[in-house]
C-alpha cells in the first residue's frame, strides 16, 4: 500500500464541465501514482442552487417544478459523460446511475409539490442530487486514465446528527465506516470518489453539512482516515491577503495557521466553509488550498503553526451583508440583565452574532448580525424590551443595515504592540469613520464597523499600512516558501 494518504476535494467550479472534470481527474490520477488518494467532489457549479430554487417552487405547489431542471441536468451530465468516458460499458453503467438519481429527484419534486411543503429533510434530499450525479462521472473519468476508481455515496461514510441543513458529523462511527469501506479500496490502489456535502443519520436519513459543506466533508474524511494532508482544489490560487476585487495588489499567502484561516472564513472570506478546520485541528493535519486550473502553483498551506510574517498581520477581510443593531439609552446604566436578555433573545432566534461591542458607560450595546437575521432580531428585541421601552429605561433599539465589518487578522498580532494603533491611525488618515470596534482576547483579529461605502477604502488603507501587498516581502516569502515545499 502507498504510504502517504491525500484527501483531495474538488469544488463546483473545478468540476464545472467536462474540461474541468478532465483536468481534475488528471490531478487525481497523477497523485494516485505516488500516493493513496481519496477524492471528494461537489456538484457541478450552480447545480445545488438550481436544485434549491426548484424545490422552493415545488413547495409553492408548482406541479411542473423540477421538470425543466431535471431535463437540463440530464443533458448537462450526459454531455460531460459522453466527452469524458469512451468505454461503452462504463458509460452505460454511469448513465444508468444518472437516470436513477434523476428519477429520484423527480419524485422528490412531485412529492413536495403535492404536499406544498418543503421539510428540511426533503430539502436535504433534493440538494444532495448534484453531488450524487457528479461522483460517478468523476470516478469513471479517473478510471479512463488507467487508475482504478469507484464512486462512493457519503451516506455510507459520514454519520451525522439529525440537524438537517447543517448536520454535525459523529466522528467515531464515521471512522469505523470509513475504515471498513474505504481502507480496503485504498489497499487495492483504488481511488474512492466520495460525494461531498452529504451524510446520513444512524437511521439512514440523508443529511447535509450546510451549503458549501464539501470542504468539511474532505476534512472529516481526512481526519478519520488519519490522512497526511487534505487538498482543497478550487478556482483561486490560495488564500489572499484581501479580496482582489477590492484591493488590486492583494497577494497569495503561502502559509497561515488554522486559527487565522478560521477567522478569515468566519468573517466572510469565501475560501473555506467555516467549519472545515474543526475536523483536522485535533490531529494537526495540514490543509492546502490550491487552484485546479493552475495546479503548478503552490497554493496556501493551512497548518497548526502557520508562519509569522512581518508585523503579525496576515490578511484582511470584510463582510457587507450584515447589519448593526444597537440597544441603549442612559436608563440602561445599572440594569444588570440587559446584556443577558439581549443575547438570550439572539440565541433563541439562532441569529448569527458576528461582533459585540459595549461602551464602558454602559449606555449602548451594539452588535452585528447577518442581514438575513436582522429584522426578526430587532422585532424580537422590541418584544423582549417592550416594558423597558415604554418606561424609557431603554430608549432605543435601532437597526443600521448600511454598514460593513472589516477584520484585520493575524495570529502573531498577539503580543505585537501597536497593531490597533496603526490600524486606526491609517483609518483616520484616510478619512474612514469608525462606528464600533472589537478585539477578541485571543488577539487574532481586530474587527471594526464602518459605513458600507467606506469599506473599500478601509481595506486599501489597512493593506497599505501593513505592507501586505508589498512586492519585496512578497518575493522574500515566495523564496522562503519554496524551501518549505521541498521539505514537506
Ligand atoms: N454543492 C454544495 C453547495 O453548493 C456543497 C459544496 O459545493 O460544497 O453548497
Ligand atoms: Mg462550494
Image (cartoon, helix red, strand yellow):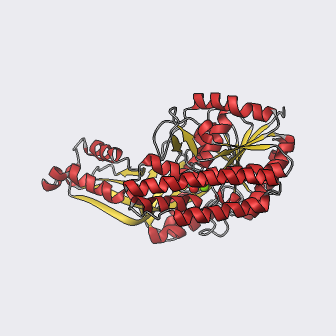
Who is closer to the viewer here, 230 or 455?
Answer: 230
- Which residue is at 20% across, 53% downward? 394
- Which residue is at 58% across, 67% downward? 460
- Which residue is at 59% across, 55% downward? 102
> Where does residue 464 sit, x and y in percent of width and height?
62, 65
- Which residue is at 21% across, 52% downward? 383
Relative placement, left or right, of 267 versus 467 is left
Relative placement, left or right, of 106 versus 355 is right
The answer to which image quadrant residue 222 occupies is top right
> Where does residue 241 sit, x and y in percent of width and height?
64, 59
The quadrant of the rendered image in which ligand 2 is seen is bottom right
> Where does residue 179 sit, x and y in percent of width and height?
69, 29
Who is closer to the viewer here, 422 or 172?
Answer: 172
The answer to which image quadrant residue 395 occupies is bottom left
Q: Quadrant of the C terminus?
A: top right
Relative placement, left or right, of 421 versus 393 is right
From this viewpoint, is residue 419 visible?
Answer: no
The answer to which image quadrant residue 228 occupies is top right
From this viewpoint, is residue 81 visible?
Answer: yes
Who is closer to the viewer here, 210 or 180?
Answer: 180
> Where does residue 116 sit, x and y in percent of width and height?
37, 56
- Against 145, residue 281 (above or below) is above
Relative placement, left or right, of 31 versus 14 is right
Amino acid at each position: 500500500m502507498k504510504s502517504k494518504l491525500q484527501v483531495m476535494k474538488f469544488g463546483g467550479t473545478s468540476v464545472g464541465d467536462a474540461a474541468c472534470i478532465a483536468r481534475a481527474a488528471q490531478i487525481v490520477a497523477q497523485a494516485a501514482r505516488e500516493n493513496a488518494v481519496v477524492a471528494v467532489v461537489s456538484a457541478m457549479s450552480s447545480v445545488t442552487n438550481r436544485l434549491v430554487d426548484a424545490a422552493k417552487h415545488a413547495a409553492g405547489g408548482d406541479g411542473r417544478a423540477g421538470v425543466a431542471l431535471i431535463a437540463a441536468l440530464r443533458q448537462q451530465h450526459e454531455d460531460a459523460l459522453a466527452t469524458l468516458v469512451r468505454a461503452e460499458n462504463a458509460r452505460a453503467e454511469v448513465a444508468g446511475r444518472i437516470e436513477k438519481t434523476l428519477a429520484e429527484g423527480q419524485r422528490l419534486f412531485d412529492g413536495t409539490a403535492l404536499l406544498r411543503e418543503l421539510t428540511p429533510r426533503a430539502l436535504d434530499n433534493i440538494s444532495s442530487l448534484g453531488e450524487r450525479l457528479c461522483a460517478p462521472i468523476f470516478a469513471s473519468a479517473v478510471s479512463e486514465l488507467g487508475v482504478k476508481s469507484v464512486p462512493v455515496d457519503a451516506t455510507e461514510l459520514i454519520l451525522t446528527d439529525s440537524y438537517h441543513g447543517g448536520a454535525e458529523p459523529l466522528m467515531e462511527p464515521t471512522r469505523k465506516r470509513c475504515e471498513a469501506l474505504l481502507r480496503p479500496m485504498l489497499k487495492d490502489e483504488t481511488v474512492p470518489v466520495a460525494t461531498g456535502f452529504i451524510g446520513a443519520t444512524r437511521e439512514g436519513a440523508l443529511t447535509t453539512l450546510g451549503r458549501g459543506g464539501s470542504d468539511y466533508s474532505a476534512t472529516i474524511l481526512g481526519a478519520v482516515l488519519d490522512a497526511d494532508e487534505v487538498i482543497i482544489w478550487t478556482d483561486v490560487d490560495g488564500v489572499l491577503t484581501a479580496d482582489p476585487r477590492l484591493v488590486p495588489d492583494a497577494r497569495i499567502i503561502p502559509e497561515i495557521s488554522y486559527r487565522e484561516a478560521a477567522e478569515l472564513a468566519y468573517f466572510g472570506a469565501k475560501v473555506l466553509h467555516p467549519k472545515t478546520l474543526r475536523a483536522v485541528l485535533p490531529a494537526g493535519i495540514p490543509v492546502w488550498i490550491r487552484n485546479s486550473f493552475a495546479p503548478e502553483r503552490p497554493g496556501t498551506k493551512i497548518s497548526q503553526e502557520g508562519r509569522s510574517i512581518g508585523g503579525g498581520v496576515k490578511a484582511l477581510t470584510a463582510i457587507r451583508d450584515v447589519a448593526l443593531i444597537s440597544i441603549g439609552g442612559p436608563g440602561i446604566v445599572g440594569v444588570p440583565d440587559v446584556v443577558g436578555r439581549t443575547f438570550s433573545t439572539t440565541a433563541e432566534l439562532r441569529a448569527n452574532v458576528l461582533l459585540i461591542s459595549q461602551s464602558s458607560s454602559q449606555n449602548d450595546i451594539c452588535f452585528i448580525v447577518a442581514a438575513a437575521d436582522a429584522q426578526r432580531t430587532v422585532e424580537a428585541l422590541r418584544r423582549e424590551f417592550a416594558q423597558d421601552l415604554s418606561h424609557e429605561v431603554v430608549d432605543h433599539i435601532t437597526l443600521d443595515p448600511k454598514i460593513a465589518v472589516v477584520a484585520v487578522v493575524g495570529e502573531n498580532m498577539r503580543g505585537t504592540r501597536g497593531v490597533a494603533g496603526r490600524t486606526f491611525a491609517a483609518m483616520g488618515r484616510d478619512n474612514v469613520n469608525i462606528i464600533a470596534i472589537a478585539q477578541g482576547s485571543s488577539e487574532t483579529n481586530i474587527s471594526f464597523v464602518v459605513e458600507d461605502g467606506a469599506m473599500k477604502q478601509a481595506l486599501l488603507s489597512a493593506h497599505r499600512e501593513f505592507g501586505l501587498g508589498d512586492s519585496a516581502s512578497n518575493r522574500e516569502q515566495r523564496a522562503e516558501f519554496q524551501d518549505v515545499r521541498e521539505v514537506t
